[in-house]
Image: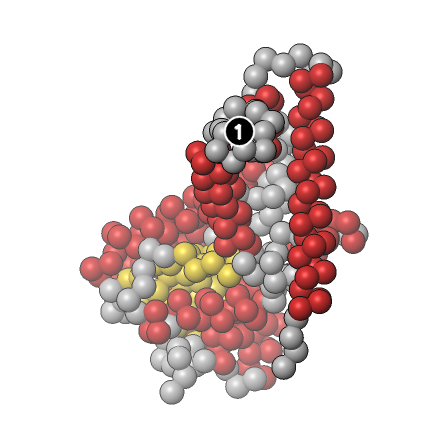
Amino acid sequence: MSRLSGKVALITGASSGLGRVGAERFAAEGASVVIADITDGDEAVEAIDAAGGEASFVRCDVTDPSSVENAVNFAVESYGGLHVLYNNAGVMLSDDDNPVTTSVETYQKTMDINVLGTMLGCKYAIPAMQQSGGGSIVNVASFVAHMGAATPQVAYTASKGAVLAMTREIAVIYARQGIRCNALCPGPIMTPLLAKFLSDDAKRNRRLVHIPMGRFGEPTEIANGALFLASDESSWMTGQSLIIDGGITAAYVLGVSRAIGETMVAAIAAGMQPTLTLNPLEPAATMTAYIVQVSLGDVPHGSVAYQTIFATGLMLLLLTLLFNIAGHVLKKRYRQVY
């Protein structure tokens, strides 16, 4: 039996990109799909019909309450109910930067589409779900909602943080009414939206360096996550965020944990006095602790004490390099191949 058999799903922003891939995936699993988008979605409907699925298109501006209400009514009137809302529509504008340079217009447009659009979808879909006996809401947030972005995009990050908070609130309110609400938090996915920001290899590599798996995600991988949240397979899951980011979040959490944990252990064990001694019983400061101690003090710029920060950092780099080279040599010499 198909995972969404007998269910009606409304997907915003589904004419292209992640939304379209999700619509095709939902339809392949038996859902009657309503594609709601401000741009024409007839091509997406034709593709689903050709594959043996069932879909319809309704024009919808997610920032317009009457337009969203009309889309929900269209789904109910066309298929007899509503069981899944996939709030996928969103924007990440090219001039979204830091708080100083980002225009008020860019910030407001981002919040209107990403946050208000999500709220309006829930506002009109929830009563329809209640009449249909319950349902599942999938709100698209982002991994940046948990940890911020590596490159400045203050409006987008703020909007996705709001979506995540809204998701948790809705989940708690309607948990006893058979309506689940979860957030899907993708990492960088190779879509036309992301491609606009990867105009050259330098920009591409700057983003790839943060991804432990070494590649961008594929739209089908996000669609599979959305399918899980929409289906009864996640029936005891609500108010949660499903992060699909190639390991980015885990890497940052691990990095912070190591930086705090290992540095604190070394500082407590060694001490904070910059003493040069070969006696392991004498208290001494670690190199990193010394750099922090000096840089936070009232040391004049260009003084000898100031220059020692860089000398210590260089020494730390060289020692780390030597240890890595030694480890590599030992591994090659004593490694046994079975």
Percent position of residue 146, x then y? 46, 47
Q: Work out which quarter of the rendered image holds the C terminus and state it.
A: bottom right
Q: Which residue is mark 1?
A: 284
**Image: 319 above or below 214:** above
- Viewer-side residue, 16 vs 56: 16
The residue depicted at 57 percent of the width and 17 percent of the height is: 297
The residue depicted at 46 percent of the width and 66 percent of the height is: 226
- Viewer-side residue, 172 vs 119: 172
Percent position of residue 7, x then y? 37, 75
Horizontal side of residue 272 vs 128, given as left or right: right
**Image: 140 above or below 112:** below
Q: Residues within 10 Å of mark 1 (few under 14, many from 20)?
A: many
Q: Work out which quarter of the rendered image holds the N terminus and state it.
A: bottom left
Residue 96 makes an appearance in the image: no
**Image: 91 above or below 23:** above
**Image: 73 above or below 30:** above
